[in-house]
């Protein structure tokens, strides 16, 4: 701290950096091809929206992340913190074998 004299000091402040969060998820190799693709979001409080192809999203509900396709509904879920864990089919016949890559802000 810079000294002002008489034993006084000015506190120094540092700019806080915003915590990083996942802004993009690429779903690949899933058995339900319409759920594969790129999902993006602009802030940590929003869900992800699929870009291109059949519309879809990735959203959080009941302590789980879901991949949703407008064609058939929920296709996979992940009960781990986002960026880890496995994506599992919601019901038999929905997307399995999913590989996901994550991009942080």
Image (cartoon, helix red, strand yellow):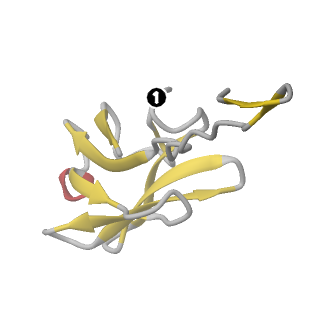
> Horizontal placement of 6 versus 40: left or right?
right
Which residue, as the protein is rendered here, is positioned at the far front? 6
Give the residue displayed 54% in from the left and 49% down from the top. Answer: 65
Which is nearer the eye, 59 or 105? 105
- Residue 56 at what x, y percent from top left? 33, 68
Residue depicted at x 47% and y 64%: 47
**In the rendering, at what x and y percent does residue 15 appear?**
53, 44
Relative vertical location of residue 34 with respect to residue 56 in this rendering, above or below: above
Q: Position of residue 74 (x, y in %)?
A: 46, 60
47 up-or-down from 71: above or below = above
41 or 14, which is in the foreground? Answer: 14
Viewed as shown, does residue 67 lie left or right of 33?
right
Identify residue for label 1: 86
**In which quadrant of the rendered view does residue 92 lie?**
top left
Residue 9 horizontal/vertical position (percent):
77, 32
| Secondary structure beneath label 1 | loop
Q: Is residue 85 above or below residue 26?
A: above
Q: Residues within 10 Å of mark 1 (few under 14, many from 20)?
A: some
At x 41%, y 45%, the residue is: 22
């Amino acid at each position: 701290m810079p000294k002002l004299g008489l034993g006084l000091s000015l506190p120094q402040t540092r700019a806080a950096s915003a915590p990083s969060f996942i802004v993009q998820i690429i779903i690949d190799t899933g058995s339900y091809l319409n759920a594969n693709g790129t999902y993006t979001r602009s802030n940590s409080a929003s869900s992800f929206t699929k870009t291109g192809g059949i519309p879809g999203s990735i959203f959080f509900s009941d302590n789980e992340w879901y991949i949703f396709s407008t064609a058939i509904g929920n296709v996979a879920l992940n009960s781990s913190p986002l960026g880890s864990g496995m994506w599992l089919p919601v019901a038999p016949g929905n997307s399995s074998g999913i590989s996901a890559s994550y991009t942080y802000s």
